[in-house]
């Protein structure tokens, strides 16, 4: 009888350890979170220039609402990397400053010898630890420095939702986190680069 009781206690302890291990296991999620989802690009102005691969582009640091300078620098760098990858322009460089007005942007472009100057801006940003939805709205204007005109103007938006938790009898499986703003920025940068070489909104 004692042996049977000992076996029962051992099995109970084993089962408890199995439940504890399963409930605390990393990467044991409930439903999946959504990947960064880009809405179709809203095109306000689109240049009819047939060829830009022999021109130069300077990208100003993104304007931001509030105190999100790190997000602005990250966004600018991601757009730079994606545009470099597409070879849409002969040369692409980041200009480490912002411009308060279109006239300021044109002046900076002329000063630094660029054919075009790009003015990105974060219009709305909602970031979290991943347990809540995330969202990023961006505007991108590209000015033709040579003619002092607006060549391209687009609006972009991306979002991500966290997965739902799954409640079981002995544990709760946490849903996957929503994508952070960095992932949304990368998705929007890729979308914009594709637009610049394809010319057709997604």
Image: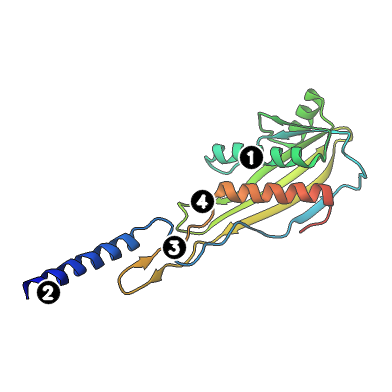
Q: Residue 88: where, in percent of width, then height?
A: 82, 41
Query: Are the residues flagged by discs 3 and 4 in contact, CB closer than 8 Å?
Result: no
The nearer-to-camera label among 4 and 2 is 2
Question: What is the crowding at mark 1: few (fewer than 14 residues within 10 Å), some, or many (at least 20)?
Answer: many
Mark 4 or 2, nearer chain start:
2
Comparing 37 with 7, the one in front is 7
Give coordinates of residue 160: x percent, y percent.
56, 59
The residue sitting at the right extreme is 50
How far is disc 3 from disc 2 in space, using C-alphas?
Answer: 37 Å
Badge 1 is on which residue?
A: 63
In the figure, residue 202 lies in which quadrant? bottom right
SS assignment at label 1? loop
Mark 3 and mark 2 lie on one chain; the one further toward the N terminus is 2
The answer for how far apart the CA atoms under marks 3 and 4 are is 21 Å
**Where residue 97 sits in the image (x, y, percent)?**
66, 29
Mark seen at residue 29: 3
Q: Which residue appears at 45% of the width and 51% of the height? A: 129
Q: Say which residue label 4 marks.
A: 127
């Amino acid at each position: 009888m004692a042996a049977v009781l000992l076996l029962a206690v051992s099995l109970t302890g084993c089962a408890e350890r199995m439940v504890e291990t399963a409930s605390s296991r990393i990467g044991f999620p409930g439903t999946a979170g959504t990947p960064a989802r880009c809405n179709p690009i809203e095109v306000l102005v689109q240049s009819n220039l047939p060829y830009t691969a022999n021109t130069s582009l300077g990208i100003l640091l993104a304007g931001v609402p509030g105190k999100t300078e790190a997000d602005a620098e990250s966004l600018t760098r991601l757009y730079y990397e994606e545009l470099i990858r597409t070879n849409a322009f002969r040369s692409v460089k980041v200009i480490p400053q912002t411009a308060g007005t279109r006239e300021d942007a044109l002046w900076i472009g002329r000063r630094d010898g660029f054919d075009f100057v790009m003015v990105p801006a974060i219009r709305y940003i909602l970031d979290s630890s991943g347990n809540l939805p995330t969202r990023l709205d961006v505007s991108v204007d590209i000015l033709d420095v040579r003619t002092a005109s607006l060549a391209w103007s687009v609006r972009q938006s991306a979002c991500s939702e966290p997965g739902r938790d799954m409640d079981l009898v002995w544990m709760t499986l946490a849903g996957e986190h929503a994508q952070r703003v960095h992932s949304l920025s990368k998705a929007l940068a890729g979308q914009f680069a594709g637009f610049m070489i394809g010319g057709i909104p997604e």
